[in-house]
Image (cartoon, grey):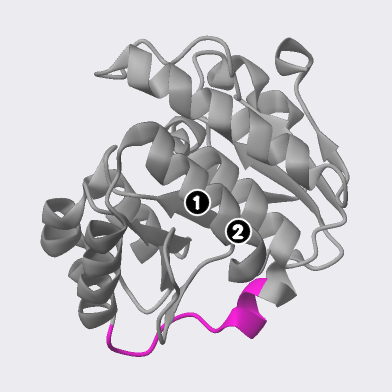
Amino acid sequence: MDFWEWEPYYEQILSDFGFERLKDEKAARLLSRLLSRKRTKLSDLRGFLVGQVVTVLGNGPRLADELHLVEGVVIAADEAATVAQSKGIAPEIIVTDLDGGPEDLLAANDRGSIVIVHAHGDNMEALGRWAGRLSSRSLGTTQSSPLAQIYNFGGFTDGDRAVFLADHFGARVIRLLGFDFERPNPKDQSPEVKQRKLIWAKKLIRLLQKRSVILFPASSS
């Protein structure tokens, strides 16, 4: 999704949660500085994803039970990567705002996973601590206006941003595992806020279904 398509939804999210666009833009500039050296090319991402069956892993409470259904290219949302790796599944791509287990993500990055790290107004401390340690197999994103080398493919939470990424780069089929839009993961620190974010995530993914083949898990349809 191009930014001009995404921006109206972004403006609604800012209003709904009381987020500050200026803080998001400040975070994007910080990430741009931290990822100043050579990064993963967009053409490489397209090569991974175009025409492929892609499985996107969300960090819902039932993810471990659904991992036997993985097919094709695997994109993991943040801590879903840790769960997948504990079962012997190495995601090709990890989408994260670094609020999960950054050490696990860095280790996965060292082993070859491409990490798509996201900047927003509330994670600048984590960006400063971890983003500069990523290898060249990484890329920066923002939910606000894109910058040079900091992209916006659409999406809000780690999970739906992973789906937007697969859609943007031409996945043939996008399968969702570990997504639960009704019950936040018990480890989430602010369940009420997380629930509101999940409502948005489901809304945004449903939006993409108008142009992509997206298969929801039975528990989330």
Q: Position of residue 199 (x, y in %)?
A: 56, 24
Verify whether residue 18 appears in magenta: no
Quadrant of the image for the N terminus? bottom right
Question: Is residue 71 visible to us here?
Answer: no
Residue picked out by circle 2: 6
Image height of 130 relative to 163, above or below? below
Left or right: where 134 falls relative to 167: left
The residue sitting at 72% across, 11% down in the picture is: 219
Q: Which mark is residue 10?
A: 1
Mark 1 secondary-structure assignment: helix
The residue sitting at 75% across, 42% down in the picture is: 207
Three-letter code for the amino acid on which mark 2 is drawn: Trp
The residue sitting at 25% across, 75% down in the picture is: 29
Verify whether residue 37 appears in magenta: yes
Q: Position of residue 45 (x, y in %)?
A: 63, 73
Q: Position of residue 166 (x, y in %)?
A: 69, 57
Quadrant of the image for the C terminus? top right
The residue sitting at 28% across, 79% down in the picture is: 32
Q: Which mark is residue 75?
A: none
125 vs 68, nearest the viewer:
125
Image height of 115 relative to 185, above or below? below
Name the quadrant containing residue 25.
bottom left
Three-letter code for the amino acid on which mark 1 is drawn: Tyr
Marks 1 and 2, how far apart in space?
Answer: 6 Å
Q: Which residues are magenta?
A: 36-45
Q: Position of residue 162 (x, y in %)?
A: 58, 49
* Mark 1 and mark 2 residues within 8 Å of each other at the beta carbon: yes
Name the quadrant containing residue 78.
top left
Left or right: where 134 falls relative to 142: left
Q: Residues within 10 Å of mark 2 (few under 14, many from 20)?
A: some
